[in-house]
Image (cartoon, helix red, strand yellow):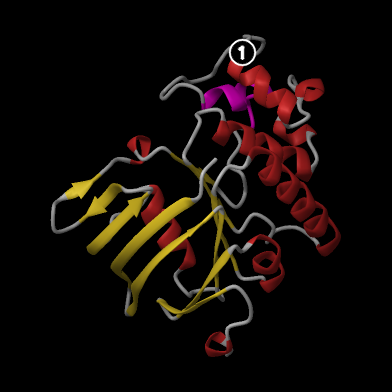
Amino acid sequence: MSTMELDFAIHKTLRSGQRRFTLDVDARVSGQRIVLLGPSGAGKSVTLKAIAGLMAPDAGHIRLNGQTLFDAASRIDLAAQQRNVAYVFQDYALFPHLNVRQNVGFGLKRGWFNPGAGQAQAEVDYWLDAFGLAAMAHQLPAELSGGQRQRTALARALVAKPSALLLDEPFSALDEALRETMRDELDALQKRLRIPMVLITHDPADAARFGDVVLHLRDGKVVCRTLGRCEEAAP
């Protein structure tokens, strides 16, 4: 796939009781792998959800590959289903009562609930084979390893042929040994499939592995953009 062009200015104020958080991020970047790096509470997840259409900014704009996904001034706010991006949640959000084939098939047709347990679909079969999941197609998520669950979530995301993959802290819940294994797997898969992705993380090791461009976030702002270490982002 070609290089992804991402242009956004996202302004959002969140309130919870007496607490208030203001996100004010602005960047224009291109690359196949874009990483948003920062500590908890920096605004990474809010930014990613805004790009995905899971949360509307108060002001600003979001453009992906020249298409306007959101523009407050022009009153454009495409629904998540219209943005042609795939959001992979931190916990993968697999349906526990559906087997691997059904979970992947769920991403194929909007609103298609509970695909048949053995129902064959050429697109589903393609991604099951691509991710090495064909042998466990009839297993439930609880019967899978962490790596198999992540691959199932990625296959479900990619079966709809999105223009970009959005990954929410994909390794944060894993222990260090498994985290490195999963980094290797995702790295190899992305290089093979060449699907553009935006990944958010608090771990500099993830940014070092996946960041064509790294946007460092702190306290709701982009403090610098870099291919290496960002001195301004240091605590």
Q: Locate residue 115 relative to residue 46 in the image: left or right.
A: right
Where 58 falls versus 42 (above or below)?
Answer: above
Q: Farthest residue to the front: give it.
A: 2
Q: Position of residue 82 (x, y in %)?
A: 33, 36
Where 189 falls versus 111 (above or below)?
Answer: below
Q: Position of residue 52 (x, y in %)?
A: 40, 48
Q: Farthest residue to the top: give it.
A: 119
Label 1, secondary structure: give it: helix
Q: In this view of the protein, can residue 99 be seen by the observer?
A: no
Where 139 falls versus 92 (above or below)?
Answer: above
The residue shown at (41%, 37%) is 84
Quadrant of the snapshot with the C terminus: bottom right
Q: In this view of the protein, can residue 214 be seen by the observer?
A: yes
- For label 1, count other residues whose C-alpha is less than 10 Å away and answer few (under 14), some (14-19) or many (20+): few
Amino acid marked by disc 1: Ala
Q: Quadrant of residue 158?
A: top right
Where 217 falls versus 191 (above or below)?
Answer: below
Q: Locate residue 215 relative to residue 192 in the image: left or right.
A: left
Label 1 belongs to which residue? 122
Q: Locate residue 22 relative to residue 39 in the image: left or right.
A: left
Q: Position of residue 56 (x, y in %)?
A: 28, 55
Q: Farthest residue to the right: give it.
A: 177
The residue shown at (45%, 21%) is 109
Quadrant of the snapshot with the N terminus: top right
The residue shown at (29%, 67%) is 12
Q: Quadrant of residue 174?
A: bottom right
53 in the magenta segment: no
Q: Which residues are magenta?
A: 96-107
Q: Locate residue 137 relative to residue 212 in the image: left or right.
A: right
The residue shown at (45%, 57%) is 48
Q: Farthest residue to the left: give it.
A: 74
